Image (cartoon, rainbow, N blue to C red):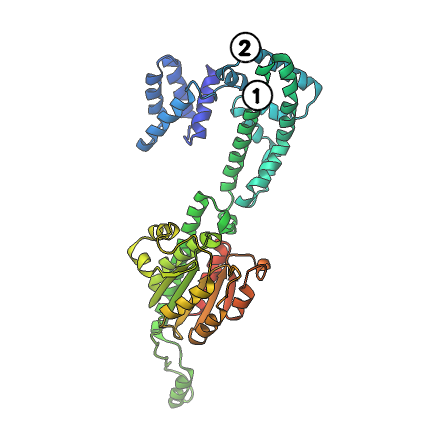
């Protein structure tokens, strides 16, 4: 009974339920009082102990039913799971005997074989061993999940266990014939399942890595949960810049000191500047044009850039946004009418511009020049794209013409600077026509780009 209780609690915790010691004791008492025969009553009784929120109830019922499903094959140790898959006691006995002989012959992969043959909680115990924890404590970025999964697997002897189980296949076939092959396949599935659980554990540890490290992760490698966190970070950047703008406005109301007039007026008092004269502040609210390449190679970065622009549009007298792949389309009204999330979904669905085409920078820049006819010395143009033209014309001469009229051109490239100019990349050509070029691959880079953008004001 205690083994089944332990496995049930383990399964519930893996499904996201937080079981305190007091809850675990109460649940064990409920099970001891009701027993296992009436599963429906037991499920309802345990729900009163485990479930804390109404929306968790259905998830608990699903977890409970899945745990006790006849084809689940997850409770208990390896041998119990094999029995649930239809293997006989004689076949299990032959496997036990083979495990024993291997343990006497070699220690290679012993820890991992214990994790495979033991209950699911055995792997958690092994992962808490000091040496394994030290391995994972060195992880500094979510991008290192694959590397540290391999290191932890090596520390636990998973590869050795895989080799041992593969070598067992011949002995199992000699002992059990065709059923030996079936048993070997079942063992291989158990090892694969353990590897998946091992990676899940490392990914959970990666999520605990500091937000600073996550901010340095390239956009293209973010998981869905990490992308959500990064969108929150983008909104925080926008809020921070909005706060700085309020401070700037407050200071601008007073105006800057006019030193020449102040000293001339001080001649009345013998050169002592009793009266400070300030320059009248000029209304010079800037304008912003944002153009984003939304082709497959840069779509992740462009979505963050467009969301940032949607957040700070109110800081500009005229903020317009465009997206392109081969054709250019304006999205200003889309972001005004819809939330950033819905607007980004519309762009990602191909409803704004066809996404199946290849990037055509020359056409997009020419269409931009025709559409944005109000470019003047208050206008800053921000372009996000990798500058890969698919060996078509680059349209850099259009950038040169726009620069003569605009306050500045800021180009954000989501590719590493070391790859600029390779293959069909025309980034060096574009960089010569821009006021500033930034390698923008992470949220941290985007924050630096945002600050640079505001320096043009």
Point out residue 15 in the picture as x, y percentages from the top left corner.
43, 30
Q: Say which of 181 and 99 sits in front.
A: 181
Q: Say which of 216 and 48 sits in front.
A: 216
The answer to whether residue 362 is above or below residue 306 is below
Identify the mark at residue 312; answer none if there is no mark. Answer: none
Give the CA separation, mark 2 to mark 1: 16 Å
The quadrant in which residue 271 appears is: bottom left
Point out residue 33 in the picture as x, y percentages from the top left corner.
37, 13
Left or right side of 211 for 306: left
Most distant residue in the right direction = 105
Most distant residue in the top direction = 90
Left or right side of 347 for 216: right
Identify the mark at residue 89; answer none if there is no mark. Answer: 2
- Is label 2 in a helix, a strand or a loop? helix
Point out residue 225 in the picture as x, y percentages from the top left corner.
44, 43
The quadrant in which residue 13 appears is: top left
- Is label 1 in a helix, a strand or a loop? helix
The residue lying at 52 percent from left, 17 percent from top is 82
The residue lying at 62 percent from left, 16 percent from top is 172
Q: Can residue 454 be seen in this view?
A: no
Point out residue 301 in the picture as x, y percentages from the top left corner.
46, 54
Q: Nearer the viewer, mark 2 or mark 1?
A: 2
Q: Earlier in the sequence, mark 2 or mark 1?
A: 2
Identify the mark at residue 117; answer none if there is no mark. Answer: 1
The answer to whether residue 89 is above or below residue 168 is above
Q: Say which of 198 and 207 sits in front.
A: 198
The residue lying at 53 percent from left, 14 percent from top is 87
């Amino acid at each position: 009974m205690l083994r089944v209780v332990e496995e049930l609690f383990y399964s519930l915790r893996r499904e996201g339920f937080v079981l305190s010691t007091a809850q675990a004791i109460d649940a064990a008492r409920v099970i001891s009082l009701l027993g296992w025969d009436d599963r429906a009553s037991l499920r309802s009784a345990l729900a009163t102990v485990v479930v804390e929120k109404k929306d968790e109830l259905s998830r608990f019922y699903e977890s409970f039913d899945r745990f006790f499903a006849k084809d689940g094959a997850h409770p208990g140790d390896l041998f119990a799971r094999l029995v649930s898959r239809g293997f006989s006691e004689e076949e299990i006995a032959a496997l036990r005997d083979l495990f024993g002989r291997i343990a006497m012959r070699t220690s290679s992969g012993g820890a991992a074989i214990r994790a495979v043959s033991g209950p699911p909680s055995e792997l958690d115990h092994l992962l808490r061993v000091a040496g394994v924890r030290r391995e994972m404590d060195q992880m500094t970025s979510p991008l290192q999940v694959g590397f540290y999964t391999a290191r932890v697997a090596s520390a636990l002897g998973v590869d050795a266990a895989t080799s041992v189980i593969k070598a067992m296949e011949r002995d199992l076939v000699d002992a059990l014939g065709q059923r030996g092959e079936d048993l070997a396949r079942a063992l291989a599935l158990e090892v694969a399942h353990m590897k998946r659980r091992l990676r899940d554990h490392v990914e959970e540890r990666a999520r605990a890595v500091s937000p600073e490290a996550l901010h340095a992760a390239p956009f293209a490698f973010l998981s869905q949960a990490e992308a959500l966190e990064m969108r929150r970070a983008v909104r925080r950047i926008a809020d921070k810049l909005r706060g700085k703008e309020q401070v700037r406005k407050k200071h601008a109301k007073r105006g800057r000191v006019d030193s020449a007039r102040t000293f001339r007026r001080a001649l009345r008092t013998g050169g002592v500047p009793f009266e400070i004269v300030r320059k009248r502040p000029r209304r010079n609210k800037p304008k912003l044009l944002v153009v984003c390449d939304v082709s497959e190679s840069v779509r992740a970065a462009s979505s963050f850039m467009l969301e940032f622009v949607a957040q700070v549009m109110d800081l500009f007298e005229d903020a317009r946004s465009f997206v392109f792949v081969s054709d250019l389309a304006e999205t200003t009204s889309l972001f005004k009418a819809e939330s950033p999330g819905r607007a980004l979904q519309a762009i990602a669905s191909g409803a704004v511009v066809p996404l199946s085409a290849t990037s055509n920078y020359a056409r997009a820049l020419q269409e931009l020049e025709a559409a944005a006819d109000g470019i003047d010395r208050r206008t800053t143009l921000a372009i996000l794209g990798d500058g890969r033209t698919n060996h078509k014309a680059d349209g850099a001469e259009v950038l040169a013409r726009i620069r003569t009229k605009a306050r500045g051109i800021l180009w954000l490239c989501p590719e590493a600077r070391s790859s600029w100019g390779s293959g069909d990349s025309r980034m060096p050509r574009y960089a010569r026509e821009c006021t500033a070029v930034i390698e923008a691959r992470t949220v941290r880079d985007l924050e630096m780009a945002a600050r640079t953008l505001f320096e043009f004001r």
